[in-house]
């Protein structure tokens, strides 16, 4: 878990042994509720036609636009009825084994806090808007719900085999930054994209990034960046297809990956199914932090 700014070693004061904390919904301030509404309204102008149908349908089913930050006591029964998942609150990033244990038991850990109004576009740690708006709609899909549970179960094993960096890349390039083919177009399903106004446009329309057909072992070897827009997106044919390829025993996959070279973020290989060959202009110009 070295990729992120800070993670506590033990549950902070007030957190349970599994790192959960109460949502304490009544304690959110009017400004915090307004921040949710602002972010929600902004994404709804951008996502239709760009986000996958399965995401839009899930968002709609959860009814997250009733005014302010969703109350988990209201949201969870709807989610649970659809796929058996629930959302629990955590103080921020939690250790890998804690994260995996929640997922393996169909609990999605969400940050309890929301970003401040001066940080609408960039934050280091996942907040409740990223976690709930970004991740939870996909958890209403039965196949995606199974995929996430399998990831939690696979995480413990990957960690014990020293293969966690490889498995984390799979999560990154699907759950966080995945694209899928839909109606002859590229559509977003990754939570890191759908929860970002700027990346929602960049990911599907910008000429900079490469867009490559999903290949499990290729993805598990590909480095990624956590500080800016991605330089490559991987495109699945359907959630069903993603689930099918990840349901196999990863033992032989890990054996092949053991000692294999990593792949640079901007690489295009002869074996790649290239959907868009990006010009990488955004990254070359210095990206988000360009002077
Ligand atoms: N904790 N709260 C939270 N949210 C995450 O997305 C998260 C985490 N801990 C570890 C983690 N993600 C990833 O590094 C693992 O998938 C490897
Ligand atoms: Fe996330």
Image: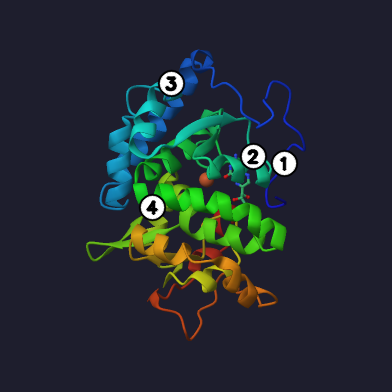
Tell me the SS state at disc 2.
Answer: loop
Residue at (68% x, 56% y) in the render: 159
* Disc number for residue 73: 3
Callout 1–callout 3 Cβ contact below 8 Å: no
| Comes first in the chain, label 4 or label 3 | 3
Q: Residues within 10 Å of mark 2 (few under 14, many from 20)?
A: many
User: Is residue 222 visible in the rendered structure shown here?
Assistant: no
Badge 4 marks a residue whose secondary structure is loop
Confirm or reject: label 3 Cβ below 8 Å from ligand 1.
Answer: no
Judging by the rendered image, the residue that carries numbered circle 2 is: 93
Q: Specify the label residue 189 is tagged with.
A: 4
Look at discs 4 and 3 and give the one toward the viewer: 3
Label 2 vs label 3: CA separation?
A: 22 Å
- Kindly identify which numbered label has been placed on residue 92: none
Earlier-in-chain disc, 1 versus 4: 1
The structure's colour scheme is rainbow
Residue 6 numbered mark, or none: 1
Above or below — where is 169 with respect to 6? below
């Amino acid at each position: 878990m070295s990729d992120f700014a800070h993670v506590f070693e033990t549950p902070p004061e007030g957190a349970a042994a599994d790192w959960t904390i109460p949502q304490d919904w009544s304690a959110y301030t009017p400004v915090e509720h307004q921040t949710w509404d602002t972010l929600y309204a902004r994404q709804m102008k951008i996502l239709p036609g760009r986000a996958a149908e399965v995401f839009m349908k899930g968002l709609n089913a959860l009814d997250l636009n009733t005014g302010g930050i969703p109350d988990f006591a209201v949201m969870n029964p709807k989610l649970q009825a659809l796929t058996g998942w629930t959302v629990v609150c955590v103080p921020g990033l939690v250790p890998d084994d804690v994260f995996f244990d929640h997922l393996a038991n169909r609990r999605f850990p969400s940050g309890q806090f929301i970003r401040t109004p001066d940080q609408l576009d960039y934050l280091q740690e996942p907040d409740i808007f990223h976690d709930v708006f970004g991740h939870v709609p996909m958890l209403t899909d039965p196949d995606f719900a199974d995929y996430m549970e399998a990831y939690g179960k696979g995480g413990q094993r990957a960690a014990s085999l020293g293969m966690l960096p490889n498995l984390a890349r799979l999560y990154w390039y699907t759950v966080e930054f995945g694209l899928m083919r839909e109606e002859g177009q590229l559509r977003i399903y990754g939570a890191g994209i759908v929860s970002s106004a700027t990346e929602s446009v960049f990911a599907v329309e910008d000429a900079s990034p490469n867009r490559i057909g999903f290949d499990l072992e290729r993805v598990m070897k590909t480095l990624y960046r956590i500080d800016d827009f991605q330089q490559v997106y991987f495109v699945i044919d359907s959630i069903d297809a993603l689930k099918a390829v990840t349901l196999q025993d990863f033992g032989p996959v890990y054996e092949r990956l053991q000692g294999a070279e990593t792949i640079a973020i901007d690489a295009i290989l002869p074996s790649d199914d290239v959907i868009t060959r990006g010009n990488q202009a955004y990254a070359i110009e210095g990206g988000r932090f360009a002077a």
